[in-house]
């Protein structure tokens, strides 16, 4: 569980740096925004993906 959190934080950090570079017009904005959204979405799904009771 802790490795998933560490990996998700690292991916969000990389995507955020690419987003900042796109604001400086070094990296394309069209690629960085979906990458940042996907990184945040995957990290939230990793945190919420716990064992749930599915019934008997």
Image: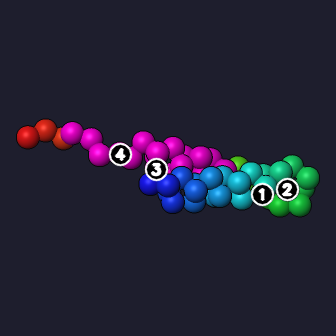
Q: Residue at x 64, y 58 (%)?
A: 11
Per the model, the C-alpha gap separating discs 1 and 2 is 5 Å
Image disc number at residue 50:
4
Image disc number at residue 18:
1
Dominant secondary structure of the residues highlighted in magenta in the image: helix
Q: Which residue is mark 2?
A: 21
Q: Assign the N terminus to one quadrant of the image.
A: bottom left
Q: Position of residue 32 (x, y in %)?
A: 73, 55
Image disc number at residue 39:
none
| Render colour scheme | rainbow
Q: Position of residue 27 (x, y in %)?
A: 83, 61
Q: Is residue 24 above or below residue 56?
A: below
From the viewer's perspective, tell me whether residue 2 is left or right of residue 13: left
Does 41 lie within the magenta span? yes
Label 2, secondary structure: give it. Answer: helix
Q: Is residue 31 at all visible to an observer of this figure?
A: no
Per the model, the C-alpha gap separating discs 4 and 1 is 30 Å
Per the model, the C-alpha gap separating discs 1 and 3 is 22 Å
Within the image, what quadrant is residue 8 found in?
Answer: bottom right
Q: Assign the C terminus to one quadrant of the image.
A: top left
From the viewer's perspective, tell me whether residue 45 is left or right of residue 7: left
Q: Position of residue 49 (x, y in %)?
A: 38, 47
Mark 2 neighbour class, 10 Å CA radius: few under 14, some 14 to 19, many 20 or more: some
Image disc number at residue 46:
3
């Amino acid at each position: 569980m802790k490795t998933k959190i560490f990996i998700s934080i690292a991916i969000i950090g990389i995507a955020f740096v690419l987003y900042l570079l796109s604001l400086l017009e070094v990296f394309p904005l069209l690629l960085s925004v979906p990458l940042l959204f996907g990184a945040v979405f995957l990290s939230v799904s990793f945190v919420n993906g716990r064992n749930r009771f599915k019934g008997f």
